[in-house]
Amino acid sequence: MRRQFVAGNWKMHGNLAGNAALLGDVVAGVGTAPCEVAVCVPFPYLGQCRQLLEVSNIALGAQDCSVHSSGAHTGEVSVAMLQDFGCRYVIVGHSERRADHHESDSLVAAKAERALEVGMTPIVCVGESLAERESGETATVVLRQLQAVTHLLGGQTAGIVVAYEPVWAIGTGRTATAAQAQEVHALLRAHLRKVSEAAGEVRILYGGSVKPDNAAELFAQPDIDGGLIGGASLKATDFLAIAGAAHDKRP
Ligand code: 13P
């Protein structure tokens, strides 16, 4: 059984007062969510959010990690540091980092490996740009991105979460249709099945303009196991409504 999973990616949003209000409402309302819930917050707020989540079963995550374990790497944050703050998840390879920081497939794969080494779950993001979709390259791009990770892990994929986030759907209000998303999720699942016996257990999330009014249809697709939520995770009622649209899946 794959337990559905809804994770918020706050991106570079938040402040001390706002985080307390948002998580106060999320914690108060999450009680009956039929899925696992996590929030991936900016580094400086990990300590604050850890405390705010202590009374809940909501997991804490970060939005990136260093590929290095420690050392002279100014500005970097290691997986051990994230673990120190109680992070269970770390997003790696988000398209905004691939674009803003020129992160390569092999760097993203190595970050996923660092996370697994310390027992944290990497949420590995893959997704094509609009130009790549329009030129028929979606499958090639997302499989290349995923394969970099599965190759480095030698098929030991049981500990990862994958997030399919078409770049053209992020923050644009233009969601992939449930059928478009399912088609790509099925491709990703087929690749995982080829390289690992645990493929049926790996959760593949959809991300890109998930809102309360489209979450249920997306999450009902056979290979969509929840969502990675950007903008809507900053509003407690929306985030809770999205989590409420999830349900468990048989592998
Ligand atoms: P939006 O939900 O704001 O489109 O962002 C999706 C995303 O990038 C989550 O990682």
Image: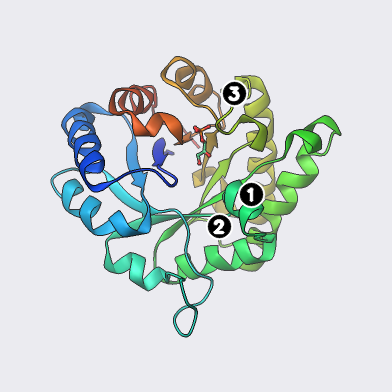
Question: Which residue is labeled 3 in the image?
Answer: 175
Q: Is mark 2 within 8 Å of ligand 1?
A: no
Kindly indicate whether the residue at mark 2 contacts the one at mark 1 (C-beta within 8 angstroms).
yes
Amino acid, disc 1: Leu
Q: Determine the CA span between mark 1 and mark 2.
A: 8 Å
Amino acid, disc 2: Thr
Q: Determine the CA span between mark 1 and mark 3.
A: 24 Å
The residue closer to the viewer here, 90 or 225, is 90
The residue closer to the viewer here, 147 or 134, is 134
Q: Earlier in the sequence, mark 1 or mark 3?
A: 3
Q: Label for residue 157?
A: 2
Amino acid, disc 3: Thr
Q: Earlier in the sequence, mark 1 or mark 2?
A: 2
Question: What residue appears at the point 33 percent right and 39 percent down from the top-left corner?
Answer: 36
Q: Residue furthest left?
A: 55
The residue closer to the viewer here, 11 or 127, is 11
Q: Quadrant of residue 184?
A: top right
Q: Determine the CA span between mark 2 and mark 3.
A: 27 Å
Question: Which residue is labeled 1 in the image?
Answer: 192
